[in-house]
Image (tube, rainbow, N blue to C red):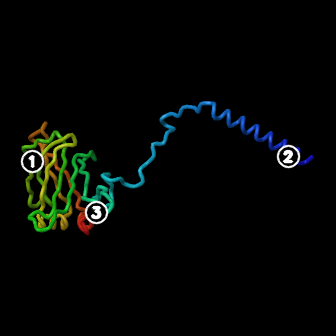
Amino acid sequence: MRSILTSLFLAALLTQASVAIAQETTAPAPAATADELSLGEPVGPQVGDPYVREEFGDWALRCIKSDAGSPDPCNLYQLLTNDDGVAVAEFNIFRLPEGQRAAAGATVVVPLETLLTQQLTISVDGANPRRYPFTFCNRAGCVARVGFTQEEIDEFKRGVRATVRLVPAAAPTEEVILDVSLSGFTAGYDSATEGE
């Protein structure tokens, strides 16, 4: 008798489960909203993705993920802001191969509304200002491609503050002076050049 009751009980359970499964498979699932969908996230930087490898004072060591087995190219980066804290320009510096007059290169990106004929002026601690032409403009801004000798890199390493001077096209009699903090520059530059 007990085995008959157990068999009936199991048969009833299987019947209920079959009905429940049939109802679940025939009833349409409610539509998910865009907020409920997961788009997934990449695991670590993907080839071609920029990432910050390390920070040194006011500088970030920004790199681009390369294919496996290749070193990731990196440069030191600092976002330059005006006195109100508004982002105005980007300063990127990178090492060049040895044996050339320029030991390092830099790209400085400024707003499109810059008076290009006035060029870009960079100095360290107010000494030895040098003027550099703009190379091109695109949607991101106008770019000056700059070369620094080893002596100029050494000035950056010894310095406290560099400045970037530009002139707005809408106000050609005025100038904008942006501070470039040199806090962390030496450690960042030396780290960026190790093994690259």
Label ID, residue 71: 3
- State which tag comes first along the sequence, 3 or 1: 3
What secondary structure is marked by label 2? Answer: helix
- Residue displayed at 33% across by 55% down: 51
- Between the residue at mark 3 and the residue at mark 2, the CA separation in whole angstroms equals 68 Å
Where, quadrant-wise, is the C terminus in this rendering? bottom left
Residue at position x 9%, y 52% from top?
Answer: 132
The amino acid marked with disc number 2 is Thr
Can you say whether 165 is above or below 25 in the image?
below
Hey, what amino acid is under mark 1? Gln
- Residue drawn where x is 21% and y is 63% of the image: 160
State the CA–CA distance, disc 2 to disc 1: 92 Å
What residue is pinned by disc 1? 119
Mark 1 Cα shell of 10 Å, populated few (<14), some (14-19), many (≥20)? some
Please tell me which of labels 3 and 2 falls first in the chain. 2
Q: Is the Cβ of the residue at disc 3 closer than 8 Å to that at disc 1? A: no
In which quarter of the view is residue 122 placed?
bottom left
Mark 2 sits on what residue? Answer: 6
Q: Residue 81 bears which disc, if any? A: none
153 sits to left or right of 194: left
Disc 3/disc 1 C-alpha distance (Å) = 34 Å
